[in-house]
Image (cartoon, rainbow, N blue to C red):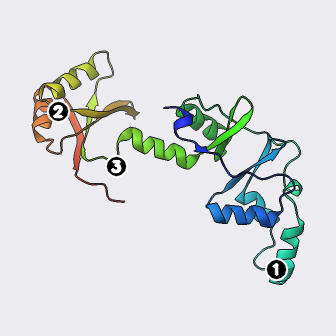
Amino acid sequence: MHVRSRMTRNPVTITKQTTIAEALELMRKYNIRRLPVMERDKLIGIVTDRDLSEVSPSPATSLSVFEINYLLAKMKVADVLPKRQEIFTISPNAYVEEAAIILREHKVGALPVLENGKLVGIITETNIFDAFIDLLGVKEAGSRITLEVEDKPGTLARVTEIIKNEGTNISRVAVFREEEKTFLVIRITHENVNPIINLLKNAGYKIHSYKSYSTYTE
């Protein structure tokens, strides 16, 4: 899965001359927390709602609403933009997992997406979470089977062969390790999972858990 398929295209942007008041209004209007800062079509930085809140007057201030609005209307984004801000970016052709690693390692919440030096999108933590949910098929009807298996060649092939012979379609497969144990997670399109569970048990596989989902409930 590529960043291109998950990024928010044509993100809302600002310039150094945008006022703090205008930037805050854009964040409220579009329900976003970050704004790329552009200068002559070139990305020069990114500001977050946290950056803006740090320069905004405290709710406990003695200033009047008029005075607060006046200050925010006078202050520019240039006043809060670090002079040597390190900007982490990514290509639209990169994989989503690459974006996740950069976000995690550098403790940032979003990455501007650049193609040939041009800003074409932005990918955020929320985009990554949505991709993770889709990869696991969390919102799809069907069943989820988790088996504790040996981590050796051929294990996946043997398990999927059993399911295939039952005439059931596999929609998702994932592997994770926990406390030196290996777990195979398989999602199938059938809601009646009992026949497959019995077949897997008879084949000697240890069923860790299983559950059927007819609809997704938030």
Label at residue 139: 3
The residue under the point 39% across, 30% down is: 180
* Position of 6 relative to 72 (above/below): above
Q: Position of residue 108 (x, y in %)?
A: 67, 45
* Residue 216 visible, this orientation: yes
Out of 140 and 104, give the one closest to the viewer. 140
* Residue 112 visible, this orientation: no
Out of 208 and 98, give the one closest to the viewer. 98
Question: Which quarter of the figure has residue 192?
Answer: top left
Is tag 1's residue or tag 2's residue first in the polypeptide sequence?
1
Kind of residue at badge 1 = Thr
Q: Nearer the viewer, mark 3 or mark 1?
A: 3
Residue position for label 2? 168
What secondary structure is found at the residue carrying circle 3? loop
* Position of 110 relative to 98 (above/below): below
Q: Nearer the viewer, mark 1 or mark 2?
A: 2
Q: Residues within 10 Å of mark 2 (few under 14, many from 20)?
A: some
Q: Residues within 10 Å of mark 3 (few under 14, many from 20)?
A: some
Q: CA distance from mark 3 to mark 2?
A: 19 Å
Q: CA distance from mark 3 to mark 1?
A: 46 Å
The residue under the point 64% across, 47% down is: 109
Q: CA distance from mark 1 to mark 2?
A: 64 Å
Residue position for label 1? 61
154 left or right of 125 in image: left
159 left or right of 138 in image: left
Kind of residue at badge 3 = Lys
Out of 101 and 201, give the one closest to the viewer. 101
Kind of residue at badge 2 = Thr
* Position of 185 relative to 160 (above/below): below
Q: Position of residue 25 (x, y in %)?
A: 72, 66
The residue under the point 90% across, 68% down is: 74
Is tag 3's residue or tag 2's residue first in the polypeptide sequence?
3
